[in-house]
Amino acid sequence: MNRAALMAVVALSALILPWLLPDTAVSRTDVTGSIFNRVKWTADSNPFVLSGDIVVENGGRLIIERDVVVVFTPGARLRIKGHVDAYRVFFNGGMNANNAETLAFLPGSSGNLFRCAFLDLSLVCDASDIRLTSSVVSNRNGTGVAIGSEVTPHISDTSFHGNSYFAVYRSGNDPLDVKNCYWGSKNGPSCEGPGEGDTVSSNIVFRPFRTRETISFLILAKTAVDTGGDPSGRTIQLAYSLYNLNTFDQEAILGASLVGSDQRAYSHPESDIDATISPGLHEFTRTFNIPA
């Protein structure tokens, strides 16, 4: 098990230690349309909600900074003709087989995706100048990564599990190296592979592969504060929603602090939750007693 300390600030913000990605729903940024120039998405405007198609046009550059959460509404697509850089970003589709959310790199595009999490959407690669590394891909609605023929994106050191169709599918007959990846089982991918993990197409060269996940993905999906229920106003309820996108259990301490008018932080460790987070989405609640 990996252990991470998770601290949520009562003022509806989040202080996240390494390995965790936040989305505290303090704000919401709806995005649609085209990007022609250099645009940066930052975590203080989380989450970025794709209410329709977004197109990064030729010459456009989208920089998605660490801890950003990108939410795809049903059927939304992020289509890349220019360039995208994303580091430690959570791309969240919807759990519905008919939604078909996609992040698509079109011919001539480029991008770097490092330490990202892709849940319930397809990553489509129709260009060669793409790097996907140290990430996790889990699409319960279909194929995790779909690759066009005669293109050679670099995909390595990534965890594939829970994809309902192919983990990686490549059109055409020419082989593509997708090495040092975890396929959801210690004995490798299934179908064209020897193991019981996710399926790969016949032209994917998957050896050598990892027998276990080496990077943790524990995501604070939402926090909420409820000030009702106590006439004195001295006790508040805190709620945490966490995604464990790994195949193993993780541990987290769900704590909180209250910042007073004197800018001091007050904690209430007696009601902290020492939680074991199994794979999937989980919700927790706790109380916080406001000091005199």
Image (cartoon, rainbow, N blue to C red):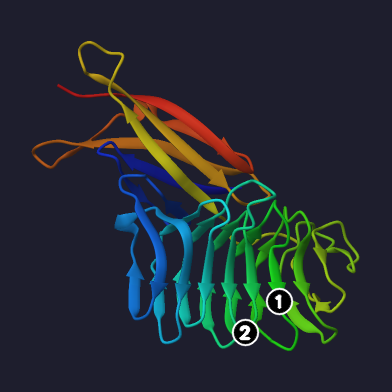
**Image quarter in which the C terminus is found:** top left
Residue drawn 66% across the image and 48% down it:
248
Helix, strand or loop at disc 1? strand
* Label placed on residue 147: 1
Residue 111 vs residue 102, the one in the foreground: 102
Q: Secondary structure at mark 2?
A: loop
Do the numbered discs 2 and 1 sit on residues whose CB atoms are within 8 Å? no
At which x and y percent is residue 240? 44, 36
Q: Quadrant of residue 120?
A: bottom right
In the image, which disc is placed on residue 200? none
- Furthest residue toward top: 231
- Image location (x, y in percent) of residue 211: 76, 63
Q: Quadrant of residue 43?
A: bottom left
Identify the residue at horizontal 65%, vertical 81% (top origin).
126
Give above or below for 114 relative to 71: below
Q: Residues within 10 Å of mark 2 (few under 14, many from 20)?
A: many
Q: Is 56 displayed left or right of 96 in the figure?
A: left
**Residue occupying the point 62% across, 42% down:** 280
Foreground residue among 142 and 32: 32
Location of residue 281 with respect to 17 vertically, above or below: above
- Tell which circle, 2 or 1, labels the residue nearer the N-terminal end: 2
- The residue at which mark 2 appears reads as 127
Task: Pinpoint residue 233: horizontal percent, then vertical percent.
Answer: 21, 17
Q: Left or right: where does residue 223 sit relative to residue 278?
A: left
